Image (cartoon, rainbow, N blue to C red):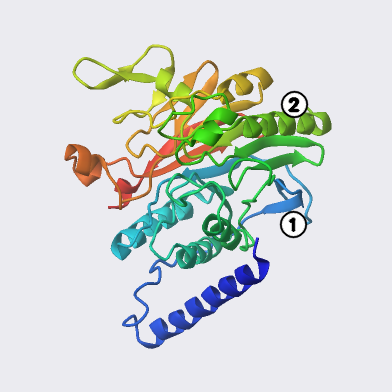
Amino acid sequence: MRPITTFVRHNSIKAMLTAEQGLKNASKGKIGKNLFGVEPKFIGTDVRIIKETDDSTFIAKCDTNGKIVNKPFKILVTTDLHLCDDWELINKSLSMLAKHVEAEKPDLILFTGDVVLTDHQQVDCIQFGRFMEKMGIYWAYVFGNHEARAEKEYHKYFMLKNLTSFPHCLSKFGDPSLFGYGNFFINILSSPTSIQQSIVMLDSGRNTSPTHNVENGAPAELKGYDFLKKDQIDWYKKNILELEKEYGKFKSIMAMHIALCEYEKVMKQDEDGNYVPTGEAEILYGGMYESVGCSEFNSGMFDAIKELGSTQAVIVGHDHINDFCAKYDGVYLVYAQCDGYNTYTMGSNFGWDEKDWMQGVTMIDMNKDGEISFRQRFNRDYL
């Protein structure tokens, strides 16, 4: 898609940012106030890319000789940083993220959408990529409902093109025939012939459209938040089955922005307007303080998950003040902790003191056999 224009724009932005950084250094911060002001510490990694396909990256922990080793694996997930045009809040979110990364030293960092939303989004997604690269850890990014205004248009394409230019970014455009940009797999190997865990990353869209509604069996007039499309579900099933043929049975995690309809099975509003357990799910931690922002149309991804038996967890963002981890029908349904401040919070909605807010990150601890557990880390611990 417009390769010459993309090349020129991308390199012009990089040159502009480099020049502005030089001016900022020379002026001792008086110039260059539109640059991110957080310098994260370098952490490094023993994870290596083993091989790649058009819609998958295979990674593994390796020893100093480059041999794959089977060790526990740690994933940090966060969402909805909402890096808008308040530079103080941008730097606050990034500073908190850097502190969590320094403390946990994860093997992989995942962002489940609505991250870079500034007025100069194409410039600032390169700033964001540079920020991430300084930590020396592999990371991946899927779109939320705010990064772009259409399923496939140049603005969204260029943003992902900029992000994927960074060496540690594992995001991919994926199969061009699918809905959206950024449907891809990250396969974590425990040996050359076995998968410890697979991460399925999906573009969950923005709002419904009559065309996609009709194509996917939803009412044409349906409005509201989007749903996963039939082609994405079929692609997920096809890839899981093909990987099983080569590597045998394995476990997987699904990550995206908008929740599946099944998240509504976890909690419900009581007569006083408070959210309480439905009794249909085991709640392991966290709570619910707003309705689940899912589509009114259930396109069947959870049924596909149950049919294949590979995916043991789904993790999403979007609903900033929900942070539960629950187990429903044998599958973990998890909200990643929101790291953003330029958005609604427990303070704006309920008047809570910041020391009680839920901003932070979610950790996934995985053992050598691919079994996983979840835990929360809070930004309030660094106030």
Disc 2 packing (10 Å; few <14; some 14–19; many ≥20): some
Depth check: give the residue in front, 279 or 69: 279
As measured in the structure, the alpha-carbon distance from the residue carrying label 2 to the one carrying label 1 is 29 Å
Numbered circle sitting on residue 249 = 2
Which picture quadrant has residue 136? bottom right
Q: Is residue 321 above or below residue 291?
A: below
Residue 193 spot, x, y in % from top left: 82, 37
Q: Is residue 40 visible?
A: no
Residue 241 relative to residue 309: left or right: right
Q: Amino acid at mark 1?
A: Thr
- For disc 1, the marked residue is 64
Mark closer to the chain start, 2 or 1: 1
Depth check: give the residue in front, 317 or 121: 121
Q: Amino acid at mark 2?
A: Lys
Residue 150 spot, x, y in % from top left: 50, 48
Q: Is residue 14 above or below residue 110?
A: below
Q: Residue at x 62, y 63 (%)?
A: 165
Q: Is residue 379 above or below residue 277?
A: below
In this rendering, which labeled residue sits more in front, label 2 or label 1?
2
